[in-house]
Image (tube, helix red, strand yellow):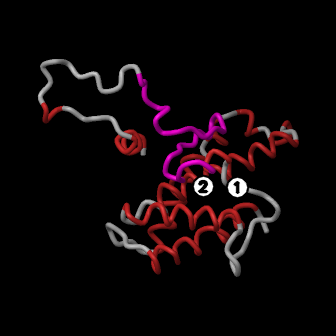
């Protein structure tokens, strides 16, 4: 099974089924809209392959480069699922969905398709939830959302700040400013 088909077949439908059967959404969605969101975000992350010369000259790619390409495609897919498929649910369902998503991706649910002898979730996701991390395709690197802010300058408000003009930095404000 080609890589893209496998990613879609193994992950998307079981997760949509879980959302429909076991979760409540803050804003109702339809399956087609969720899939479109995944594909849009995934496509935007994969633009690196059009922009970086390293990936545009196929005859110069080595086996290592091809493995890196596969990891970028897989990681971009996971991030896209996390921030389209997995965010439609109410916050109280995020932890149960996180566990379900990890089980689907790790092939731990009987009766569902599994990946062929590989792991697509990055090891960083062994700690925390799928919602705790951001992916940088240009660097092929996962990081905590909180790594995006300068902790030394975090929430240093001028003394004359009006309370209604203050935005306290949280992991959620960082995520939503990025997404």
User: Residue 134: within the magenta?
Assistant: yes
Residue 164, x across and y down, in percent: 13, 36
**Mark 1 closeness class: few <14, some 14–19, many ≥20 residues within 10 Å:** some
Which of the two residues, 20 or 98, is positioned nearer the viewer here?
98
Numbered range of the magenta stretch: 126-151
Q: Secondary structure at mark 1?
A: loop
Which residue is most to the front? 127
Residue 117, x across and y down, in percent: 82, 62
**Mark 2 closeness class: few <14, some 14–19, many ≥20 residues within 10 Å:** many
Residue 114, x across and y down, in percent: 74, 70
Residue highlighted by disc 1 = 120
Q: Is residue 5 left or right of residue 33?
A: right
Q: Is residue 15 left or right of residue 33?
A: right
111 vs 161: above or below: below
The quadrant in which the N terminus is found is: bottom right
Residue 14, x across and y down, in percent: 59, 74
72 vs 53: above or below: below
Q: Secondary structure at mark 2?
A: helix
73 vs 32: above or below: above
Residue highlighted by disc 2 = 78
User: Residue 34: within the magenta?
Assistant: no
Residue at (67% x, 48% y) in the render: 122
**Pointers 2 and 1 in contact (CB under 8 A)?**
yes
Disc tally is 2
Which of the two residues, 126 or 145, is positioned nearer the viewer here?
126
Distance from disc 2 to disc 1, alpha carbons, whole Å, reads 8 Å
């Amino acid at each position: 099974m080609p890589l893209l088909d496998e990613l879609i077949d193994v992950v998307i439908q079981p997760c949509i089924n879980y959302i429909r059967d076991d979760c409540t959404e803050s804003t109702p969605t339809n399956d087609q809209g969720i899939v479109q969101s995944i594909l849009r975000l995934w496509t935007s992350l994969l633009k690196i392959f059009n922009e970086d010369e390293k990936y545009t000259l196929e005859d110069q790619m080595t086996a290592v480069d091809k493995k890196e390409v596969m990891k970028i495609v897989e990681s971009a897919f996971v991030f896209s699922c996390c921030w389209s498929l997995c965010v439609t649910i109410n916050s109280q369902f995020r932890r149960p969905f996180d566990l379900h998503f990890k089980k689907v991706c790790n092939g731990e649910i009987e009766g569902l398709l599994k990946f062929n002898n590989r792991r697509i979730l990055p090891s960083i996701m062994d700690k925390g939830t799928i919602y705790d991390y951001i992916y940088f395709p240009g660097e092929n690197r996962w990081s905590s959302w909180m790594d995006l802010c300068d902790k030394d300058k975090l929430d240093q408000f001028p003394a004359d700040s009006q309370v209604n003009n203050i935005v306290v930095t949280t992991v959620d404000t960082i995520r939503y400013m990025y997404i």
